[in-house]
Image (cartoon, helix red, strand yellow):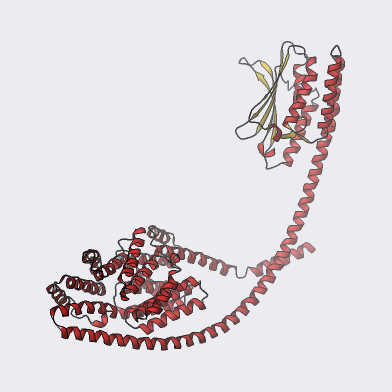
Amino acid sequence: MKHIGWSLLAIFLLLASCSGGRRHVLQNARKGQLASLSSLDDSLKKQSPHVRRLIGQGMASAEDSLTYYEYYVRMGQYFCLSSTPDSMVEYIDRTIDFASRQPKSPRLCSLLAYAYNCQAANYHNFHKNLDGQVKLYRMACEYSLQSDIKEQTPKICANLGDAYVSKNQLPEAAVWYRRALFLVDSLQLPRKENITLYMGLATIYQQLNDFATSLKYFQQTERYFDEMPLNMQAYYLNNYGNYYYYKKDYANSLKKFLLMKQLLEHHHKTDTFDMYLCKLNMADVYLNLDSIALSEKYLSEAEPFMTANHDLVAVYYCNTIHIGQEVKKGNMAAVSVILNKEKTEFPDRKDSDIAFNLRQIRNHYLREYYKAKGDFRSAYLNLKADQAMIDSLEHNRVNMRASEVMERFTQDTLRLHHSLEMEHKTAEVRKANLIALAAAAIVLLVGLAFVLKWLQSRRRLEEDKLRIMQLKLASARNRISPHFVFNVLNNKIVNAGQQEANELLALTKLIRANLDMSCRLEVSLNEELEFVNQYVEVEKYLLGDDFSYHLEVARDVPLGQIFLPSMFVQILVENAFVHGLKGWDGSKLLQVKVDQLLDGSIQIAVIDNGPGFDIRSVGKKRTGLNIITQTITIFNEHNRGRGKMTFSLRNLTDADGKVTGCESRLSINKKTI
């Protein structure tokens, strides 16, 4: 009854602890899915050559539609980073269409956040639909906060900051970068997540001409360069090169762009947006270093890509560099052609569509153009417009500082509420953990009690078996010794003669060795063979001068490292003497061979050329062989699962089938040695 009570208690506790089992299984499965997707995203960032195949494998092995589209949307991201970014549109549109028809869930929000972020990034790369960028990033941010991968939210906030930079709304951009930093702290993400956020702030301060603050953030980012994925390394070097460009430190600017070019070439990313952007920037830097030929070379390599992808801002920048090249060469007519062509091709373009820093670059070259033409009025008006914008930037800087103060106040308030909420949740979790821990401890104690009882019973059983085996082996040894001594003394009485003194001395040594070995359960093969040699030395006089004995041991057999039950080989040799060679007419031969087989086992053969073994002679006593078979049975039972010891006895025959002797063979598996 006591055991039944314990069993019922254990079953009850196990059922109680498994009440949330299905939920835990689903949570673990989702963790595995998120780990696979995170690994895939890392490969996308590094632009691994195998990533497209990995995405295809994920789509093919998806067990449901939602899993399929989680991989499908990443194929869109793959094309967004490729040389054919327009190919991504179909993947993003189909993903959003699928998600719009599904019930809302944290996992679905993760899918939508990824899709909208990818779509906005494509707009951002090619300077399309600035208002659309902001809208898409905001939607991605909202869905991310409702998803099961909230740790992606800071990156989306940083992307939204980049979008505001493109719109020349720098205070708003700084607010979103500050918010991203706050989320990194609130979500307790690794500090390395701040790397790209510092880079974004560096870019904002650079555009505000606050170069000291900008450099501080660039230097903070530089310490973590090796931890960045490839695309962020390229982004960092591009922005750092721009920093030196706007400081008019063109030599250091060129160094950063050359590093970016070498980085992309090292990773075989020569036909990508990042590489063409790098070459476009290098064309402008070389122009300011008066290397017009190199400027024209890199511009000719970058411009076709920007034109083919309808990047109007990049095309504007290409034309700006063309203007600068023609001004440097003194070809003012070509400048007029470029300006007139732009008015024709882009009649609806407004200055507000172009970032102010790019307009500043063009205005610099245009002022050189106006001065060369003698049109000082236009040069003055151009300079005046630039100065007005610079004053506006100073106004933005003041506004941004005010926004930062308010943002920090808001963040401190949110952090306080977040801290209180976390303390409440921590208390609830601690209570649940204590209950679960108590239940688990009870189950563990019950389980340990059963295990200890089972181990105790098994140990007693094994001890009983070992005692029985030792008693059996001791009994066998007690039977071997008198039987052996009786046979030897009987032979010596019959053979008493001139050499009696020497024979008795050898007999004495043999008996001493026998007494020593009979007290031991096992001996080394080397000791056993020495005992056999002593035994043969005593017994050979019974067989006459025509008896010969040979011991053959293979070279690779380590005799001192192989152990077997004592007197096993001696019994086989004695059996050959008594039942084979004794009384046999003609020459008598006894061989003992020791070999190591391919599987590592040791084989011992005792061969004689006597009349052979007659299985029909059941009336004869076979004490020695019975001892061997009984001992082997006990030995194999004790060493079950570690290899067996075997014994065989057979007659040897010639080609005509005539018996030519007998062979006893003992095999010892290496695992039993």
On screen, 224 above or below 592?
A: below
Q: Position of residue 426 (x, y in %)?
A: 60, 78
Identify the image quadrant of the C terminus: top right
Q: Residue 103, can we see it?
A: no
Q: Residue 266, can we see it?
A: yes
On screen, 370 above or below 487?
A: below
The quarter of the displayed image where residue 670 is located:
top right
Q: Position of residue 51 (x, y in %)?
A: 39, 60
* Camera-side residue of 430 and 104: 430
Q: Residue furthest left?
A: 333
Q: Position of residue 281 (x, y in %)?
A: 28, 69
Position of residue 349 in the picture relative to residue 90 (left or right): left
Position of residue 50 in the picture relative to residue 614 (left or right): left
Marker count (numbered): 0
**Residue at the spot 66% in from the left edge and 68% down from the top edge:** 15
**Residue at the spot 84% in from the left edge and 22% down from the top edge:** 507
Q: Position of residue 460 (x, y in %)?
A: 79, 50
Identify the image quadrant of the N terminus: bottom right
* Camera-side residue of 279 and 528: 279
The quarter of the displayed image where residue 607 is located:
top right
**Residue at the spot 37% in from the left edge and 73% down from the top edge:** 96
* Camera-side residue of 506 and 543: 506
**Residue at the spot 39% in from the left edge and 77% down from the top edge:** 214
